[in-house]
């Protein structure tokens, strides 16, 4: 029955665009996110109409379909089973329109984030969402997971940059809601059914993004503090003095910083490594006459108030990139660690990380707990390295990371989503009523449960 279905799908998309399991397994993913292809086949449609026709066939046959993007997610959101057909949007990689006057960009879902950033830059505009996997991640996946990244404190999550989108429901129905206006209260804003819902309610095919004015100034500093209370105070001072220009605030515990800087890592540290906390402060503005001096004044005020004990301000693009490269050094984490991203009030993050580190250290011999994250938007990443970290020690590590959130009212996923890895812990952050409503929406839009089955929650 499956072979007959694949033959019918091949008639729609072309035989060369239905790849069997062996052909897909021969591919090498740019990011090792531990999602080996186990599915029966990978289908590569060329447009919305082909996706619609494919899903109509799969809906009728009760065939499970897994949306397949750049495979950069860290929660097994694209994991497949031998029963699945994967649906790749890699051929749908056109930037259809960039409207310089309206400051919008209309793209197909297979466009990479970096391609969109470069296209916006070429016409003097700015694509505001940025994550480390920009070269491989696809915008359809970014929308489906509501990706965050390093500019959230100023520009918000992906959701805040999406004006409209087009999606295909499980039965092949095309919902084209390609709104191009900042203001549009004409009935339900249907795009939110598909942003952050991880492909469970529909396949995103095209998106209208809101672009921003390209900044004319760019300042970055790396500073060190003596304790976490001062990290929070530095954040408050940066917000007060830099206002809307503040676009990045990244904190790195020494457990992360020393791993990635010489002699343990490969990056030279522009400040002493002998501090417990390191912070990257980034500001972008449009007033070259005053912005640089204003940034320096903010740093001077932090020193004067005894909030920072060491620091360096980048004087060139090369130096800015070198500072950000330290924070971006995550390959060792992606490949070898058990990774978590959680949200809680910024003032509580220090106590939370201390508690998690203490608990894991007591129960997992030789564990190294590294912490870093986007403190300005309440997000911290916790990565645990140890022998057997994802096998025999996984249950106790998960328990300590997630149960420690309860007293703080924290969220189990800040930006990575739920996928397979976190679904057992969803009740930590969502009430029974919320989960029931999620399931009701799933049942209404995908009554046979064919889209990304098993992810987020079990029906």
Image: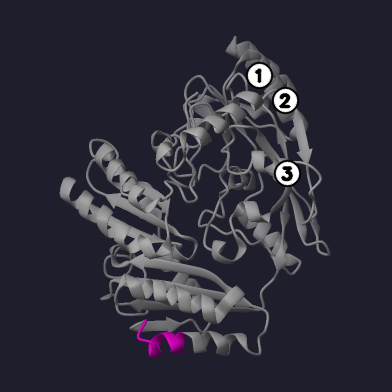
- The residues colored magenta run 299-307
Crowd rating for badge 1 (residues with CA inside 10 Å; few <14, some 14–19, many 20+): many
> For the residue labelled by badge 1, is the local secondary structure a helix, a strand or a loop?
helix
Label 2 Cα crowd, 10 Å radius (few <14 / some 14-19 / many 20+): many
Q: Which mark is residue 41?
A: none
In the rendered image, residue 67 lying in the magenta stretch gets the answer no
Q: Which residue is mark 1?
A: 59
Q: Where 232 falls versus 205 (above or below)? A: below
Check disc 3 and report the residue beneath it: 189
Q: Position of residue 396 (x, y in %)?
A: 25, 40
- Residue 318, can we see it? no
Residue displayed at 40% across by 76% down: 233
| CA–CA distance in space, label 2 to label 1 | 8 Å
Q: Are marks 1 and 3 in contact (CB under 8 Å)?
A: no
User: Which residue is drawn at the image coordinates 68% and 79% (left, top)?
Assistant: 286
Q: Is residue 366 left or right of residue 82?
A: left
Q: Nearer the viewer, residue 396 or 150?
A: 396
Q: Which residue appears at 46% of the width and 60% of the height? A: 378
Label 2 with label 1: CB-CB less than 8 Å = yes
Task: Label 3: state its secondary structure.
Answer: loop
The crowd level at tag 3 (other Cα within 10 Å; few <14, some 14-19, many 20+) is few
The residue that disc 2 covers is 172
Horizontal side of residue 156 vs 100, given as left or right? left
């Amino acid at each position: 029955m499956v072979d007959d279905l694949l033959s019918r799908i091949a008639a729609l998309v072309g035989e060369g665009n239905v790849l069997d399991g062996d052909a897909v397994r021969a591919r090498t993913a740019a990011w090792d996110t531990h999602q080996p292809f186990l599915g029966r086949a990978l289908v590569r449609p060329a447009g919305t109409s082909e996706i619609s026709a494919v899903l109509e066939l799969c809906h009728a046959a009760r065939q499970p379909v897994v949306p397949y993007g750049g495979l950069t997610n860290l929660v097994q959101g694209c994991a497949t089973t031998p029963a699945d057909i994967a649906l790749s949007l890699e051929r749908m990689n056109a930037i259809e329109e960039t409207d310089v006057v309206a400051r919008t960009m209309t793209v197909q879902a297979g466009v990479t984030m970096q391609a969109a950033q470069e296209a916006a830059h070429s016409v003097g505009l700015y694509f505001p969402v940025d994550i480390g996997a920009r070269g491989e991640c696809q915008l359809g996946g970014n929308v489906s997971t509501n990706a965050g990244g390093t500019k959230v404190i100023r520009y918000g999550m992906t959701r805040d940059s999406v004006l409209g989108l087009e999606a295909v429901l499980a039965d092949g129905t095309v919902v084209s809601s390609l709104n191009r206006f900042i203001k549009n209260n004409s009935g339900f804003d249907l795009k939110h059914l598909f942003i952050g819902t991880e492909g469970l309610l529909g396949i995103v095919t095209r998106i209208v993004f809101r672009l921003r004015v390209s900044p004319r100034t760019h300042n970055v500093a790396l500073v060190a503090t003596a304790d976490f209370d001062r990290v929070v105070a530095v954040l408050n001072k940066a917000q007060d003095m830099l206002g809307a220009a503040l676009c990045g605030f990244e904190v790195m515990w020494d457990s992360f910083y020393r791993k990635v800087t010489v002699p343990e890592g490969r990056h030279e540290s522009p400040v002493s490594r002998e501090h417990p906390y390191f912070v990257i402060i980034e500001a972008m503005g449009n007033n070259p006459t005053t912005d640089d001096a204003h940034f320096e004044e903010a740093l001077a005020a932090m020193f004067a108030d005894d909030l920072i004990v060491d620091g360096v301000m980048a004087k060139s693009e090369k130096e800015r990139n070198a500072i950000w490269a330290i924070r971006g050094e995550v390959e060792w984490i992606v490949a070898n660690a058990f990774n978590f991203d959680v949200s809680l009030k910024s003032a509580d993050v220090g106590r939370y990380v201390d508690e998690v580190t203490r608990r894991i250290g007591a129960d997992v011999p030789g564990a190294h707990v590294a912490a870093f994250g986007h403190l300005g938007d309440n997000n911290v990443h916790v990565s645990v390295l140890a022998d057997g970290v994802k096998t025999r020690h996984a249950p106790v590590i998960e328990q300590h990371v997630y149960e420690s959130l309860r007293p703080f009212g924290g969220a189990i996923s800040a930006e990575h989503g739920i996928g397979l890895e976190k679904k057992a812990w969803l009740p930590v952050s969502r009430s029974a009523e919320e989960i029931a409503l999620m399931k009701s929406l799933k049942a209404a839009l995908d009554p046979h449960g064919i889209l990304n089955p098993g992810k987020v929650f079990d029906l």
